[in-house]
Image: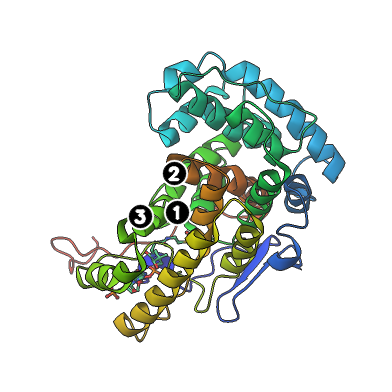
């Protein structure tokens, strides 16, 4: 029995290596520090999809195909978005994605384009505003912000979002990617696999953590309350959001690259960043005392929260925006699973009534 499949290697992948002891993330040969803030979302997509998808994935080709797909899915989603606007974001996204099944399984470009187009459209409808049509000529990250705001964002915000989407695009056999691979292993197709992955991402132990990170900072409110607040939270059995990881035993390297991206953003006041750093330092000290045998370090979600807040996104959008980046990894893993994998089917140990009975 291995609860949580910890330490179990179930697939071989060319996509990424998560080195938990050294705190390294390598994506198709390159450390994340050489990708985040350096390559664009489209270049990252090309890196992840190449030799796995049915297309030749040059960065220029990906940019053109994604731009075209944003326009096409915008037209296709016009009927469904008003029906989905009163649902929570995740359920609204699932509804929008599922509607793409009309006419057969969509391409990976359409799936990757549908998430931000639906997200921006839903966000605007919830605010009583009309969805804004995509601009195929823009980069993906710039267009996501433009569709949300109704006008071009500044260069700093666009670059920060691009860096974020690249940073979270791919990360080994995390819960949502594993879900996508399990579904793909049954040959259910791209849309079913990504829809399932979305469900797994939603939970607060996986992609749902960044909103609660800000809730925590707000609840702490002032430096003098940091230690008592965190001590009380741990004493009452709460988990501190933005800390701990299944694989990393040292600091999550994505936390550092996102912290750098946040530090470059002028609109995040120094006071907010300094306060967050104080909370981080104290949380790490208390966690070390709370769980001396389990190294609990800062994970990607802590600085994600600060970055997405600084570029003006509302908290409910944080986890769906994570999906806008992670869809690259999900789709690449689906292609890889379909090419190389077996059906994923672990076993369970029966502990119910008559557990010792021999099979007849
Ligand atoms: N705060 C307090 N205690 C913690 C935390 C935390 N953030 N993380 C783990 N622990 C404790 C657990 O309660 C557990 O204690 P126990 O043995 O007394 O039950 C012990 O440390 C070991 O924890 P596990 O649950 O075995 O750790 P696991 O590897 O399964 O979980 C996880 C990893 C889910 C990320 C966990 O650290 C957590 O819940 N963190 C907070 C939520 C979070 O930040 N999620 C985002 C993760 S990054 C991502 O998915 C993109």
Residue 64 higher or lower than 344, as above or below = above
Whole-percent x and y of residue 21?
56, 81
Locate the C terminus and report the quarter of the image it occupies. Answer: bottom left
| In this rendering, position of residue 126 left or right of residue 324 | left
Q: Label 3, on which residue?
A: 218
Residue 143 higher or lower than 276, as above or below = above
The circle on residue 315 is 2
Task: Calculate the distance from the C-alpha at mark 3 to the C-alpha at mark 1.
Answer: 13 Å
Q: In what element is the residue under mark 3? A: helix
Task: Calculate the distance from the C-alpha at mark 3 to the C-alpha at mark 2.
Answer: 12 Å
Residue 96 higher or lower than 48, as above or below = above
Whole-percent x and y of residue 143?
69, 33
Whole-percent x and y of residue 99?
53, 22
Residue 330 seen in the figure: no
Locate the N terminus and report the quarter of the image it occupies. Answer: bottom left
- Of badges 3 and 1, nearer the viewer stands 3
């Amino acid at each position: 029995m291995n609860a949580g499949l910890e330490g179990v290697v179930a697939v071989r992948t060319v996509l990424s290596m998560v080195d938990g002891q050294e705190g390294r993330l390598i994506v198709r040969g390159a450390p994340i520090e050489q990708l985040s803030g350096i390559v664009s979302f489209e270049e990252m997509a090309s890196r992840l999809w190449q030799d796995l998808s049915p297309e030749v994935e040059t960065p220029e080709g990906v940019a053109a195909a994604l731009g075209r797909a944003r326009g096409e899915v915008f037209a296709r989603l016009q009927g469904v978005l008003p029906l989905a606007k009163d649902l929570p974001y995740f359920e609204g996204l699932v509804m929008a994605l599922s509607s793409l099944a009309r006419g057969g399984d969509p391409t990976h470009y359409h799936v990757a384009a549908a998430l931000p187009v639906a997200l921006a459209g839903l966000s605007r409808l919830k605010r009583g505003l009309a969805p804004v049509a995509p601009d195929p000529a823009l980069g993906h990250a710039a267009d996501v912000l433009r569709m949300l705001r109704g006008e071009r964002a500044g260069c700093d915000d666009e670059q920060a979002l691009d860096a974020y989407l690249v940073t979270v695009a791919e990360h080994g056999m995390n819960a949502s990617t594993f879900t996508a691979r399990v579904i793909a292993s049954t040959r259910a197709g791209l849309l079913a696999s990504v829809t399932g992955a979305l469900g797994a991402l939603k939970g607060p132990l996986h992609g749902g953590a960044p909103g609660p990170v800000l809730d925590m900072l707000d609840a702490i409110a002032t430096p003098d309350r940091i230690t008592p607040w965190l001590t009380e939270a741990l004493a009452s059995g709460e988990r501190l959001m933005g800390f701990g990881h299944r694989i990393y035993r040292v600091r999550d390297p994505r936390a550092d690259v996102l912290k750098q991206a946040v530090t470059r953003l002028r609109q995040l006041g120094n006071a907010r960043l300094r306060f967050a750093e104080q909370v981080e330092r104290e949380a790490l000290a208390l966690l070390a005392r709370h769980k001396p045998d389990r190294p609990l370090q800062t994970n990607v979600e802590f600085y994600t929260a600060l970055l997405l807040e600084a570029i003006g996104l509302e908290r409910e959008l944080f986890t769906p925006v994570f999906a806008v980046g992670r869809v690259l990894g999900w789709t690449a893993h689906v292609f890889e699973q379909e090419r190389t994998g077996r059906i994923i089917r672990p076993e369970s140990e029966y502990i119910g009534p008559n557990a010792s009975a021999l099979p007849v």
